[in-house]
Amino acid sequence: MQPTRILPDLQCSLLCEEVRQEITGNFILIGIIGHVQVPQVPVTALKLCVFNRWTAGLGEFTESVRVLAPDQTTILRQSQVKFGLQDPAHHATNVSVFTQIKFESVGVYFVEVLVDDVMKLRFPLPILVVQPPSGGQPSGEKPQA
């Protein structure tokens, strides 16, 4: 008996600043993010993208991507998209774009990726306050004589 539905594997999930697609269909990810350093909070991120690639599945699915506050229950943003895989050898790429996300405080936020309400991945997004370097001149500039 042939299976009619196989839950897919999440091949990768990356948080980045921008995702572009070449004419060949290949993707370019710009500014892959592991943490966010800001001079103060609250801060608003103009744009965050979550790049997900699914494979080894069969059937129709719903992907959910959520950005959670440090309390791990408050959902700051969520996106859902339906996608299908006609053969386990195929893959599907989804990009969730979140704009104007306000981070109220420092701490570890989380990104969750689910397929059909099954958690596939949860990764941290630390928001850190970092003071700019002191000295009165931007880094890289030489003092004038």
Image (cartoon, grey):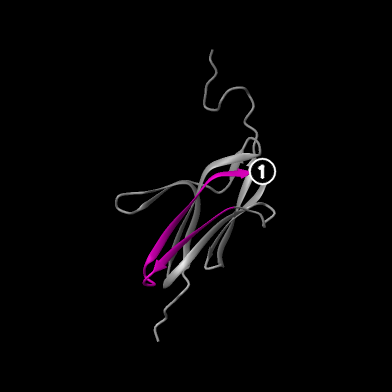
Q: Which residues are magenta?
A: 77-106
The amino acid beneath tag 1 is Glu
Q: Which of 41 and 36 lies nearest the eye of the viewer?
A: 41
**Residue furthest right in the image:** 71
Q: Is residue 3 above or below residue 111?
A: below
Q: Is residue 74 above or below residue 6?
A: above
| Disc 1 element | loop
Q: Is residue 90 magenta?
A: yes
Q: Is residue 129 above or below residue 50?
A: above
Horizontal and vertical percent position of residue 103: 63, 44
**Residue furthest bottom in the image:** 1
Q: Which residue is mark 1?
A: 104
Horizontal and vertical percent position of residue 71: 70, 54
Horizontal and vertical percent position of residue 52: 47, 58
Question: Which residue is pictured at 49% across the width and 57% down the height?
Answer: 13
Q: Is residue 42 above or below residue 4?
A: above
Q: Which of 142 and 68 lies nearest the eye of the viewer?
A: 68
Viewport quadrant of the C terminus? top right
**Residue furthest left in the image:** 24
Residue 113 seen by the camera = yes
Question: Which residue is pictured at 64% across the width and 27% down the height?
Answer: 134
Horizontal and vertical percent position of residue 137: 58, 23
Residue 57 seen by the camera = no
Left or right, residue 8 beside residue 118 = left
